[in-house]
Image (tube, rainbow, N blue to C red):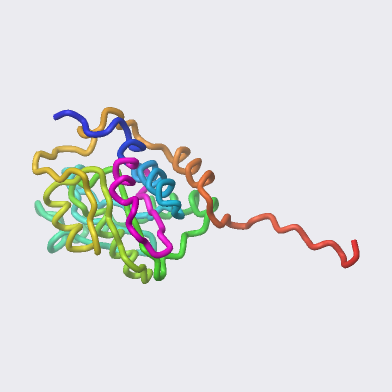
C-alpha cells in the first residue's frame, strides 16, 4: 500500500486542514507521546492553539506486544478492552503490565512536567491526537482522562485508523476526525514514508518551543519604590 504521509509533521498538516475553520472554545491540542506530539504541533500551529501532551500508554498483551488489552493514563485512569483483554490474559498479568506502564508514565511526567505544567482542560475544547490508531485503546483511555478533568468538547483526530479503532473512538469522543479509515491495517508505520521513532529529546524540544506557562518561571524582585 502506498504511504499516505511523508512523516508525522505532514500527517499533522493534513489533519490541520480538516480542522481549520471549525470553531473551538479555548482550544487545547494534546499529543500522545511520543509519536503524537509532532502531529499535535502542526495542528496547534494551524489553529493558533495551546499545545501540551497527554500521558497515556497502551497495555500490551503479555504474549503479543502489538495487541492492546487496554491503556493507562496520568492520574491513575485505566481502561481495559472488553472484559479485561483477550487470549487468556490473567488478572495478575494485567496488574503487572498496568504497574509497569504506570511507572513509565511517572518517568515521562517527571521529565515533561519540569518544562511545563499540565494545561487545564476544564471547559475547553480538546483536540487529542496520535500518529495513528490501531486499536484505539490508548486514545480511548485519553478520552476517559479528559472526561475526568471536566474537558468540554473532546475531538479525537488521527491521520490513520483501523475500522475497529474508528468505531471505538467515535463512541468515546464527541467527534472523530480521520482522513483514512481502513480494514486493511497491520501497522501504523506502513502509512508513512518516514516513521523514525520520535525521541523524548524531540518531544521536550517541541514543548519548550511552544507557547506555554513555564513551571518555576524566574521572577525578578520589584525594585524599591522610587528607584
- State the count of labels: 0
Query: Was residue 126 drawn as part of the magenta stretch in this picture?
Result: no
Name the residue rendered at 41%, 37% in the picture. Answer: 199
Residue at the right extreme? 226
Q: Is residue 112 above or below residue 155?
A: above
- The picture places residue 44, in percent across and down from the top left corner, at 41, 49
In the shown orientation, is residue 95 left or right of residue 34? left
Front residue of this view, candidates 120 and 141: 120
- The picture places residue 7, in percent across and down from the top left corner, at 32, 33
- The picture places residue 42, in percent across and down from the top left corner, at 39, 43
Front residue of this view, candidates 226 and 105: 226
Quarter of the image holding residue 39?
A: top left
Name the residue rendered at 22%, 39% in the picture. Answer: 188
In the shown orientation, is residue 215 left or right of residue 7? right
Name the residue rendered at 16%, 61% in the picture. Answer: 84
Residue at the front extreme? 21
Quarter the N terminus occupies: top left
- The picture places residue 122, in percent across and down from the top left corner, at 41, 69
Whether residue 100 is visible to the viewer of this picture, yes or no, is: no
Name the residue rendered at 39%, 41% in the picture. Answer: 38
Quarter the C terminus occupies: bottom right
Q: Over which residues does the magenta segment extend?
A: 12-34
Whether residue 11 is visible to the viewer of this picture, yes or no, is: yes
Quarter of the image holding residue 139?
A: bottom left
Front residue of this view, candidates 99 and 16: 16
Amino acid at each position: 500500500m502506498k504511504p499516505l504521509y511523508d512523516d508525522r509533521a505532514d500527517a499533522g498538516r493534513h489533519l490541520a486542514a480538516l480542522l481549520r475553520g471549525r470553531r473551538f472554545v479555548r482550544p487545547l491540542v494534546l499529543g500522545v507521546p511520543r509519536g503524537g506530539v509532532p502531529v499535535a504541533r502542526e495542528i496547534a500551529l494551524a489553529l493558533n492553539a495551546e499545545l501540551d501532551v497527554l500521558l497515556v500508554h497502551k497495555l500490551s498483551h503479555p504474549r503479543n506486544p502489538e495487541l492492546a488489552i487496554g491503556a493507562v493514563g496520568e492520574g491513575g485512569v485505566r481502561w481495559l478492552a472488553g472484559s479485561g483483554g483477550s487470549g487468556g490474559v490473567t488478572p495478575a498479568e494485567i496488574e503487572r503490565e498496568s504497574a509497569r506502564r504506570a511507572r513509565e508514565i511517572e518517568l515521562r511526567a517527571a521529565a515533561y512536567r519540569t518544562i511545563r505544567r499540565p494545561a487545564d482542560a476544564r471547559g475547553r475544547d480538546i483536540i487529542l491526537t496520535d500518529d495513528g490508531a490501531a486499536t484505539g485503546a490508548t486514545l480511548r483511555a485519553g478520552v476517559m482522562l479528559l472526561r475526568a478533568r471536566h474537558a468540554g468538547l473532546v475531538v479525537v483526530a488521527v491521520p490513520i485508523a483501523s475500522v475497529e479503532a474508528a468505531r471505538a473512538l467515535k463512541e468515546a469522543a464527541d467527534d472523530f476526525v480521520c482522513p483514512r479509515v481502513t480494514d486493511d491495517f497491520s501497522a501504523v508505520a506502513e502509512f508513512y514514508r518516514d516513521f523514525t521513532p520520535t525521541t523524548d529529546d524531540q518531544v521536550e524540544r517541541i514543548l519548550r518551543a511552544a507557547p506555554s506557562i513555564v513551571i518555576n518561571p524566574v521572577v525578578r524582585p520589584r525594585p524599591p519604590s522610587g528607584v
